[in-house]
Amino acid sequence: MKFLEKNLIALDVEVNSPEEAIRVAGGLLVSEELTEPRYVEAMLESYQKNGPYFVLAPQIALPHARPEDGVKEASASFVRLQKPIAFGSAANDPVQLVFALGASSSDEHLAMMKQLVMLLSNPVHVENLKTATSYEEIQKMIRRNE
């Protein structure tokens, strides 16, 4: 399981659309060979078809697709957008924190989801994710949270 490791985090990324945000976050998973490139396309298709169902909390999006769409290992990347962007979720827009999930059908995936939920259910952690200036800061917070 690869959870928000150094090569899976990008801070203050400039994007002009939700699709670009999904591509950047998904691209981190692809570049670490945790998913196949087609997984990013599947995430985009899912968004186009089903709308912003994965914008689960204010300012937080968790795009993902099905395991059979090209996941090699349960994984999560994190992209903080320089400027929050509207994904079309009336309740939770604009989005600033994007976590691409390489959803696998394994227990690792459940463990990863639990970790993410614990992290994001704490408003202090969410604020820290918005202001962290380095990977090390984020890593410390994750370790404290485990």
Image (spheres, grey):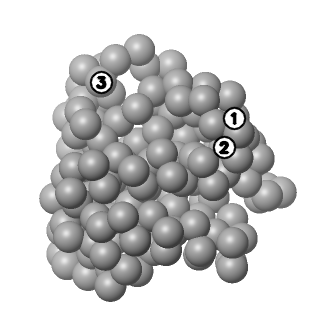
| Displayed quadrant of residue 70 | bottom left
For label 2, the SS is: strand
Quarter the N terminus occupies: bottom left
| Displayed quadrant of residue 55 | bottom right
Q: Are marks 2 and 3 in contact (CB under 8 Å)?
A: no
Measured from the top left, where is residue 66 in percent x and y?
40, 80
Residue ranking furthest to the bottom: 68
The residue at which mark 2 appears reads as 95
Question: Which residue is drawn at the image coordinates 34% and 71% (left, top)?
Answer: 103
Going from the N terminus, do you reach mark 2 or mark 3 first?
A: 2
Q: Residues within 10 Å of mark 2 (few under 14, many from 20)?
A: many
Q: Are marks 1 and 3 in contact (CB under 8 Å)?
A: no
Tell whether 56 sits left or right of 122.
Answer: right
The residue at which mark 1 appears reads as 84
The CA span between labels 2 and 3 is 20 Å
The CA span between labels 1 and 2 is 5 Å
Residue ranking furthest to the front: 37
Going from the N terminus, do you reach mark 1 or mark 3 first?
A: 1
Mark drawn on residue 75: none
Question: Which residue is drawn at the image coordinates 49% and 74% (left, top)?
Answer: 42
Q: Are marks 1 and 2 in contact (CB under 8 Å)?
A: yes
The kind of residue on which mark 3 rests is: Tyr
Question: Which residue is drawn at the image coordinates 46% and 39% (left, top)?
Answer: 79
Going from the N terminus, do you reach mark 1 or mark 2 first?
A: 1
For label 3, the SS is: helix
The residue at which mark 3 appears reads as 135
The kind of residue on which mark 2 rests is: Val
Residue 42 position (above or below residue 90): below
The kind of residue on which mark 1 rests is: Pro
Quick one: 3 or 35, which is closer to the camera?
Answer: 35
